[in-house]
Image (spheres, grey):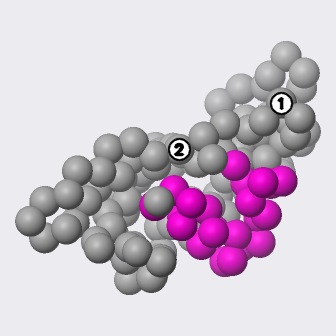
């Protein structure tokens, strides 16, 4: 599945560990810190090219860590034209929302997020 492959790619390139610092969809309550990636869209056409909307949220105890982790993931995905995953090749991306500050949670966690369209081909 593309999301699992994408998380593995992020882990191998910038060192965020899947399951403890990087999560699929949401950050589990037991961790309370980390980054989560979700994907929507992705209809294939006759070229097997698909556009996926990627949403990433980073939540940490301090503002600078939250911002830094969000930007690291954004920069990696923004500059991976031609990177090979197990079943997909990453191509251009179009930022929909560059990394930015969102809010502070009730328990003092700082949240940053970004959204982009990432094009892949099988």
* Residue 72, picture quadrant: bottom right
Residue 38 tag number: 2
Residue 87 seen in the figure: yes
Please state the horizontal and vertical placement of residue 91, each as a whole percent of the image: 34, 73
Which quarter of the rendering shows the C terminus? bottom left
Disc 2 to disc 1: CB gap under 8 Å = no
Please state the horizontal and vertical placement of residue 53, each as a whole percent of the image: 38, 47
Please state the horizontal and vertical placement of residue 65, each as a whole percent of the image: 83, 51
Residue 46 painted magenta: no
Q: Residues within 10 Å of mark 2 (few under 14, many from 20)?
A: some
Q: Which residue is mark 1?
A: 29
* Residue 5, picture quadrant: bottom right
- Residue sitting nearer the eye, 33 or 79: 33
* Residue that lies at the very extreme toward the top in this rendered image: 106
What secondary structure is marked by label 2?
strand
Q: Is residue 72 above or below residue 61?
A: below
Q: Earlier in the sequence, mark 2 or mark 1?
A: 1
What secondary structure is marked by label 1?
loop
Magenta residue span: 2-23
Residue 66 seen in the figure: no
């Amino acid at each position: 599945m593309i999301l699992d492959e994408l998380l593995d790619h992020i882990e191998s390139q910038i060192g965020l560990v899947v399951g403890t610092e990087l999560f699929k969809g949401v950050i589990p309550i037991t961790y309370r810190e980390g980054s989560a990636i979700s994907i929507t869209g992705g209809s294939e056409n006759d070229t097997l090219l698909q556009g996926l909307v990627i949403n990433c949220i980073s939540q940490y105890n301090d503002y600078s860590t939250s911002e830094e982790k969000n930007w690291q993931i954004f920069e990696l995905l923004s500059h991976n034209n031609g990177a090979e995953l197990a079943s997909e090749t990453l191509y251009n991306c179009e930022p929909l929302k560059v990394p930015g500050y969102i809010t502070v949670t009730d328990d003092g966690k700082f949240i940053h997020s970004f959204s982009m369209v990432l094009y892949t081909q099988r």
